[in-house]
Image (cartoon, coloured by chain):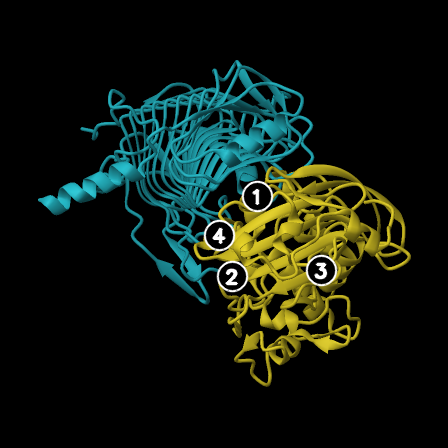
Chain colours: A cyan, B yellow
Amino acid sequence: MTRTLFAAALLLSASPLAAKTLQVTPGDDPYDALQTALIEAEPGDVVHIAAGTYALTDGLSLDVDDVTVRGDGPAATILSFKGQTGAGEGLLITSDGVLVADFAVEDTRGDGIKTKGVDRFTADNVRVEWTNGPDAQNGAYGLYPVESTNILVQNSEVIACSDAGIYVGQSDNIVVRNNRVSYNVAGIEIENSTRADVYDNVAFHNTGGILVFDLPNLPKGDGHSTRLFRNVVVNNDTDNFAPEGNIVAEVPRGLGIMVMANRNVHIFDNVLDGNDSGQIMIVAYARPYEDTDYNPLPREVVVRDNVYGEGGGAPAFPGGAELAAALGGAIPPILWDGAAAYRRGGETLEVPVRMHFDAPAVTLNVATAGDDRLGGMPSMVTDAHAEIEEPAPVVLPANQPGLSDEKALAPASD
Amino acid sequence: MGIAAPAAVLFLSSAAPAPHVADDVLMAEAPPSDFAEFGLFLDAAMTRPAPRVTPYELNSALFSDYADKARFLYVPVGKTIDYREEGVLGIPVGSALVKHFGFTRADGSMDMIETRILIHQADGWKAYPYVWDAEDRTATLKKAGARLDVVGQDDRGVKLALGWKVPNVNQCKGCHAVDGELTPIGPKARNLSGETGTRNDLEHLAALGLLSGLPGDPPHMPDWQDGHVPTDARARAYLDVNCAHCHNPAGPASNSGLFLSWETPSGPAIGIGKGPVAAGRGSGGRLVGIEPGDPDGSILLYRMDSTEPGVMMPELARTQRHDEAVDLMRAWIEEMTP
């Protein structure tokens, strides 16, 4: 008992007793003022960026644990990188327990806000925008946690990324909720990641609304266990403006939700409407690759209880128009390539892909991943009734920054 | 950045430097504002190193807008560097690495821009940038970095007006990080084993008693500028020193899956046939990192060719196109069999 008390006392004395607030206000050298505050902040501190527009010529970075960077609102505190001459992103975060809230990042030359290799990152009420609208010259990602754990992105807005607005890559334990993403190539993308809950988001006027991908030749592969639910994915109708070579350049204009490779993906209770290429597309990774650990097939995908409006009437992918015509004018809510085999070295491996669809679905009957998607004879799917256990809701740690008790995380679905 | 003045005048006009390296200053939690307080040099111009401060050169070096560099290594009394075959040498706590950046004048002296120091303290390496004043009298700590107007010249003597970026302490880590921990990059056995100038730096350090465990046949990475070396080895040496500090499995660019260190086997990991991951417009419309036989179809060349933020690689420490390196990469990719 004595021992326990002693340890508790030590813990208290080690925690910052007088966390301070570093005030940054608009001035002559905003880069120096902001970057100095981000360097001099100590764990527990708040860097407060007062309302105003800060014209920054260089990327900012934060490498101190448990710091909050807070503005006076995403319409009031604006970090403008229009004149940026260096660095790959607007704000790079490499420390744990960081909360960014209530400010905007505009017109970065590369990505907006990136976290690399961190634990417990929260973005809350942040806006990242390229103010010129969709353009291949815009930065790739708006909110960009990568190789990170315990990620919370909420109440934020991302506009006009040339890749994905909210992109979570090679990460684990992720919540993306209540965000608005528009005019990006991809609204939200979860890639090579595990355990993600993506819900209550609105994705509109992107090329594609929400993507769940798994790509080869990356340090963290085998993405799985993602739930997409209660999202509103509507009117995704922006021409694809991604630079060629990037995987999202393959996303046809007007797609609602797309799953490429990956496994154990559950898509339910969403509203999908006005997506001309189709509401939900599920396909294998079809490019050549050398990665003996990689499985290019989507497996264990559940699609249920979504509400479908108009969609699939004007598919913007090769052969799409013919397919729609053959199916009575529009492709059904679910389009699956049907691949159930893939090549590794010289051999072809067949795997049980196990699908569960409760809405009309068409399969392209592609035999093996990488084959011509238009080479098979399409048919309606009639036997996608696999019982697939849903991943448990994502639970973030109690000390996730900015996670207030009243905003409970999503419940388990029924 | 100023007019050359006789070193002796500078010596008298500034605070007398400590006669020995100030170990207590090196190990202090807060770095001094004035670089001279480290006592690492005998003269204010910092050309004459103090005892146990040894100049060294790398076989292949990082490109920094054609700037010239002078490197020094300090090992405290009673300690030695442990030889390591791979990775950075085992440089003991208490040591420091110093790098001057500047442009060499016609008389051989250096017009100083900044001096960076890496200090090995008990809880890890620390990195600090110091900026020289216009007369090259004092180098002052700039934790938040700086952007300076510098006039330099390229390898052919063509004048360059540079917006020189002094990194802030976080940006130091942008390159100098392994698994998020700060670390030196250059002093690896394979990059110190060349005949630079008149000596082999590994043998020299061992002869001074500063390096223990040196084997008879340390690994060797060539000078990328050495025309007698096969193109493939030159290209890989250049990529190792200019890219691999980020592009390795424990580095800041680990998420790209593109690994450019000397020891990475040729294949998808160095970009051959490998699609981009997070390149964005950095792909330039090219489909793979390296398309054998097709330099213009290779993202690697596109990004080295660019000087535009968001496209160019490396992201930091370069505003100029490194023409000689771009030529080498082009020749290397052209030589590859599709």
Have a look at marks 3 and 1 and say if they share a chain: yes
Q: Chain of mark 4?
A: A
Have a look at marks 4 and 2 and say if they share a chain: no
- Distance from disc 4 to disc 3, alpha carbons, whole Å, reads 66 Å
Q: Considering the numbered disc 1 on the image, is that residue within a helix, a strand or a loop? A: helix
- Mark 4 vs 1: CB contact within 8 A: no
Give the residue pinned by disc 4.
Answer: A370
Q: Nearer the viewer, mark 4 or mark 2?
A: 2
Give the residue pinned by disc 1.
Answer: B169
Give the residue pinned by disc 3.
Answer: B42
Do we see residue B193 in this rendering? yes
Do we see residue B290 in this rendering? no
Q: Could you say where residue A5 lies in the image, as x and y percent from the top left?
A: 15, 41
Have a look at marks 4 and 1 and say if they share a chain: no
Identify the mark nearer the N-term, 3 or 1: 3
Amino acid type at circle 3 is Leu
Give the residue pinned by disc 2.
Answer: B94
For the point 64% across and 44% down, the residue is: B283
